[in-house]
Image (cartoon, rainbow, N blue to C red):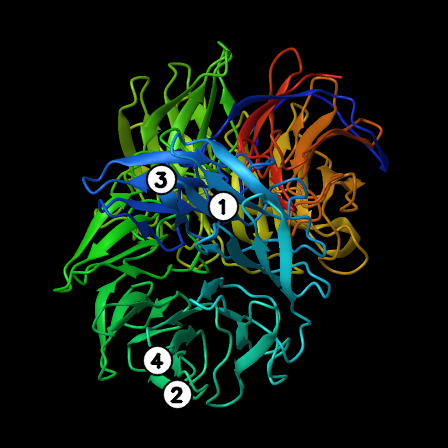
Amino acid sequence: MGMKQAAPIWLVCALSASIPARAQTATETVVYSFLNCPRGAQPYAPLARDSAGDLYGTTNQGGAANLGVVFKLTASGTQTILHSFMGGSDGAYPYSGVLLGASGTIYGTAYQGGASNAGVVYEIGPSGHEKVLYSFTGGVDGGNPYAGVVADSAGNLYGATYGGGTANAGLVYKLAPSGQETVLYNFTGKADGANPYAGVILDSGGNLYGTTLYGGSTYCTGGCGVVYKISPGGQLKVLYSFPGGPGGTAWPYAGVIRDSAGNLYGAASTGGTLSGGVLYKIDAAGNFSLLHTFNPYDQGPWQPDGGLAMDSAGNLYGTTQFVEAGNGHGVVYKLDTARNLTTLYVFPGESPGVSTNYINAGVIVDAKGNVYGATPYGGLDGTVYEVDAAGQASTLYSFSPAPGGTRPFAGVARDSAGNLYGATQLGGASNWGVVYRVDATGGEKALYSFAGGADGAFPESTPVLDRQGNVYGAALKGGSASGISGFGVVYKLTTNGQETVLHTFTNGSDGGYPGAVALDSAGNLYGAAGGGAAGGGVIYKVTLSGQFILIYSFTGGTDGGGPGGVVLDADGNLYGTTYGGGAAGYGVIFKLSPSGQETVLYSFPGGSDGAAPEGLTRDSAGNLYGATSLGGGAAFEAGYGVVFEFSAAGDYTVLYRFTGGADGGFPESPPIRSPAGNLYGTTSAGGTTGCTGTGGCGVVYEVSTSGQLTVLHAFTGGADGANPYAGPVADAAGHLYGTTSAGGKGGMVGATSSGAGVVYKIAPR
């Protein structure tokens, strides 16, 4: 995220000591749920191709519930969603591609969802209806299949699950046309292997071949993986145990393919003399040989996690995850029968919302030597591509982003008619974010879609409104004609959606990567940005005509460093906090005079008084209120944050210390204040339910004038949202409005919050 945001202000009175939290008593309503990529997003499974040249595949995310889709792409480039996973009994998050059966039937697996949220095997008929053939329990029948299925002539399906089984090390299964599952082999996690990531292949005698990611050699933690064969009777033979170690190979994410002579070919993610991964062959007699060793030190490709394909001449094709040259994210390669490796295509820079941990899928090849695949990189949310026999690459389909935006890290502003205005980090026509309006009926409209160039990209600050209905804010990046290489902008949007860039940051003395802005009665904007002459961040003013005035440049020392948003008093003084710096390095509360003279009002010591403050709210008596994202514990930044008051007389008081439990933890924005003197805010984590890596999905809280905290709503990570980074705003009746960065459509899948965020409303108690 960018600079921290200052919440809007509710004015009046005072507070005091803290006592334990009370249960929630308010009602939450989802006003709008952002939809992430309705046509699917982030494909990283191999494609399947029918006799007409149509391609079939899956995306891991996107669709109606942001839980993935099965799609068809015709030879003419028309995409059709065959099934959009909803996260219930039908499954969620398919990692594998599909198997094309007779009469247009499609088979595949989903990693999660199903009756026990341990994944499913599904069938999609010619009419597009999905039928769950088997729902894994995660127990002795297996669970969480990364891999897809293969079929025999009798219609039985075969596959592998990553988890479950008698040793929870995964298994290989057979599924009869009736839906009856037979476990063919349970991996023990020892010499026989553990946790098959890839699926199985089948020979004419009914033998199955595959790999496990772990198990086998004990050199690697958990094992380095094996290549195995399972007979029709369920007897497993380890064909090769990856040794790991210096020069040794390890971790085959990819499975194996088999030629007509019975030779097996595969790829290991790491190993070889240069540890960049290898391509290998196991002949029919069981002899292992290296075909190619990838070298990450010669600017070439490395880490071949995707599966292999072979053409009629015996050439091998695959993908890597990385390439050292340029900004690419892996390559499509060809290894000819003389063991010469050729790079056919370098994947472009990553899509804005895609992690570099996402894998490039393996490829397929047709009779003419054309290679087809899908990647989460390139385009806006991934592409389907073709590389012809001459090495010419073309994009067959580019997955489109959510037109109304996705991932709102910013909060909302509210006008007199009850419309809410906010910004999303991603989505829009170019997937660089939007400014949106949600009306009183819940209808959403993207007012402006950032192009990622001179107009800005990644707006993370809460917009502010003037009396004429114009919208002002800051975009974290962009400002350069060459795309997101810029350092952010301050923008103005007119009521008809016309954008004016008021200032483009250079990352020089004016700073870069701006955060929240505040607006005075004359139409001047005030805000904070990082960098500056001394590197500690800046506070600036932008006039109505677009003149930029540097007010103060922080050194990162005792004056503070890393400023958040600011609030103003009637005399033109600015008040704010810095995330770091100060006497102890844990941030400060500062005051800036109209001439730019700084006074450090309070320097956070860490420990029980809090650390890393996140902005301020000011009442009419001059008292300041805020929250720290860290501290509250006994030592330094230990703890889950505090809510504090800094009085006009200069007294600092901790009003509440979060425990990280049901009361919430890690408030990322300051609270707002009601006319009755109560404080309302959010925490990004904590609460009663768990989201992966946070110990909870966050809460909306109230701190009374007596210091009593009440949880108004604990987010579940489901349809109600998850992880509110921005604070709320309020209307005259006491309703609270805000956003969550995750959750919404898609709900909770396992311990992971799905969805692209929501706009919520909480009724007063």
Comparing labels 1 and 3, the label whose residue is closer to the camera = 3
Per the rendering, the mark at residue 294 is 4
- Residue 479: name its quadrant: top left
**182 over 543 or under it: above or below:** below
Label 1 environment density (alpha carbons within 10 Å; few <14, some 14–19, many ≥20): many
Q: Amino acid at mark 4?
A: Phe
In the image, taking residue 453 as reference, residue 588 lies left or right, namely right
Q: Amino acid at mark 2?
A: Ser
| Location of mark 3 (residue) | 104
Mark 2 residue element: strand
User: How many numbered circles are shown?
Assistant: 4
Sooner in the amino-acid sequence: mark 4 or mark 3: 3
Cα distance between the residues tagged 4 and 2: 15 Å
Comparing labels 4 and 1, the label whose residue is closer to the camera = 4
Sooner in the amino-acid sequence: mark 4 or mark 1: 1
In the image, taking residue 245 as reference, residue 167 lies left or right, namely right
Q: Position of residue 159 (x, y in %)?
A: 53, 58
Sooner in the amino-acid sequence: mark 1 or mark 2: 1
Per the rendering, the mark at residue 289 is 2
Q: Amino acid at mark 3?
A: Gly
Cα distance between the residues tagged 1 and 2: 54 Å
Label 4 environment density (alpha carbons within 10 Å; few <14, some 14–19, many ≥20): many
Give 125 or 499, whichever is nearer the viewer.
125
| Location of mark 1 (residue) | 3
Cα distance between the residues tagged 4 and 1: 41 Å
**Is residue 595 visible in this depiction of the protein?**
no
Mark 3 residue element: helix
Marks 3,2: beta carbons within 8 A:
no
